[in-house]
Image (tube, rainbow, N blue to C red):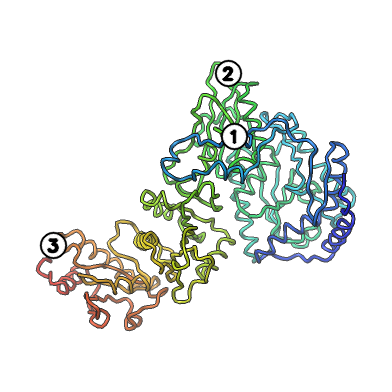
Amino acid sequence: MVSGNWMPNMLHLGAEWRQNILGMPLTCTIAQSTLVGWRERAFANRLPFILVRLLITSSLYGSCFCLVSGHIAVEPEELGSVSLLSENENFIFASSRQRQRGEVSSSISGLWYNLYTPIHEPQDKENTIDDARKKVEDESIVFFGADRTQDALHLQKGTLAAAGDFNERLDTRTPTVDSTLAVFTNEGCPYSEEALREAQLAQKMVRSLGSSLTVVNVKETELAKLLGIKTIPCLRFYLSPNIRSAAYKTYDGANIAADEIAHWILLHQGKTVQSAASFRTASSRGSPVGPVVHAFVHEGSQRAALVVRLSKNTEQLPSRFTLFYIEHVDSSEREEFRVYRKKLPFDVGEEEYLTLEEPQWEPKSILALLLEAENRMLFYGDRPSRVLLGKRALLTVYVSHLENLQDIAWLLMEFYETYRDRIAFHIAKNTLKEAARSRDTFSHSWGGAVIADKRANASAYQKVAGVMREHSPFTQYSLSMPFNYHSLQVFLKEWSTGNAELHFRSNRLTYTDKGSHVMELNHVQFLNVLQKARRVPLGILYYEPECSDCQVYLRTWKEVAEVFSTTDALKDQVLFGQVDGHLNDIIDFDMKQNIPSIAVYPEGPQALEKRILYTGPPIVNILAEFLGTVTGKREEL
């Protein structure tokens, strides 16, 4: 059955398709909107081909389709008769640890059914355990090579035949040793550089899972035009090293991210579900692509059928990137279901895997275990779902690709136990898209932290020095650089008490040890400390990172601070801080021309006017004696 108004829409889109093919220039995708356009154009270019395929399919399988507002909806007349979950069943959590931690919303059952539809048993009886090629029947996921080009091979063979040839080769268990991922790039294009970098990371991920892939960087724009490529960067997957082949698949994912590219490759290599005989002895069984289900089952058992059913419905699982390793064990051995967490680029000491401990394997128990594997002490990449956040606020840290993620992870874990019930910690991926988002928030792409709290109100937001842009509805708080233990400690404390002034000037990301006795301050924090009622002097070192003399002063200042902190008679007699004069406005203007310099500000309301300058050399004993004189503790030295 075809919708009555499908023909005018099809003719209109067909005309638009011809215009796109003939008139679209080959450009580097710089703007984020162009990336979205990439997918839309791909859909428009392949629409006539998909309609033909759907017409044929509908006649063979008794399905119908309709074209509504330029979108295709496939409406099968019959769905799978077996459902893993009934909408009437409550979603029960398998582990009580999450309830104790308060990390998952108590209304998880309702949220789960709002976000996920029931899982249906596939109609085909294809064996996916023995490395059989999984047939991708949903043509809308990845489009076949339907681009019309001037290449003679394309003209001779035809796009429809090329697509059929690709499917044929996937179905015949052809070895994938020569699989090729071609990355078409433009010289000097930042998105091209990122796409190539992510593709190379994806290659490592694919190889780590026992598959094979070669990444080829194609810089020839004329060749790209000849092959019908209209937007760069472009990723194409071939089953052979011949990138002129008419049988290929084009990556049209929303994100050019290594893990998503790797999963896309594994999907079309038929490697998302494997039978592995040696992974029990492997040193590491997780994967950076996604969580990995390791199932030891008896051949022909109900549990084996359940696992296979799950593996064919990954779109309905908490993570659609879930991989499956299934091994048939002897009937005398115990069946076991494990979920290995997705590998992150840092380690915070989480459990490597979770085990289903219930005697009866049920879909709701398995889904609960998979969801628990997604709940991390520190999230990475995409924003965690509301099911995982519950009522917690979300602290997101944006970092550039130059920063050490392990250092940032350790820093955030210093506050995990204190705020685990109120804050979920998250590090965004260091992609160009996230850098653009960081620039929009912080006016630069270096990084910073943002707390998104749904319970905030309009009075809990204030712009500082014109740096921050206004957001609505006033639910975000931000901390820019310096990003270290002391600044984050103050930031979280101020947030927890409802302080409205939670937006600080931007500086470069730095990591300082929790045990450091010197506070790294920006100009706003310096003013806050200066104006607070203090009973001891405040010593400040003004420096610039590129200044060679400053490095000597920084080491000396740190050693003196340690002396004062470890000597009982001198402890808590001076507050030690330092300010980066290159990235901060220096409130004490005389210091700007005298970097490196040290100033001691006495307690009291006129501290700025009564400050005392240190004019001696950067020697520990002399500087310590000077501070002892200021504090009246010279005899203690």
In contact (CB < 8 Å): disc 2 and disc 3: no
**Which residue is at the front of the view, 3 or 251?**
3
Residue under label 1, please give it. 89
- Which of the 4 image quadrants contains residue 304? top right
Kind of residue at disc 1: Glu
Of the two numbered discs 2 and 3 on the same chain, state the one appearing first in sequence. Answer: 2
Location of residue 143 in the rendering, given as x and y in whole percent from the top left corner: 76, 49
Location of residue 573 in the rendering, given as x and y in whole percent from the top left corner: 18, 66
Residue under label 3, please give it. 569
The secondary element bearing badge 2 is classed as loop
Kind of residue at disc 3: Ala
Location of residue 297 in the rendering, given as x and y in whole percent from the top left corner: 59, 24
Whether 3 is drawn above or below 306: the answer is below
- Which of the 4 image quadrants contains residue 541? bottom left
Q: Tell me the CA gap for discs 1 and 2.
A: 33 Å
Q: Which residue: 32% across, 76% down? A: 596
Location of residue 376 in the rendering, given as x and y in whole percent from the top left corner: 48, 45
Q: Which residue: 42% across, 46% down? A: 348
The secondary element bearing badge 3 is classed as loop
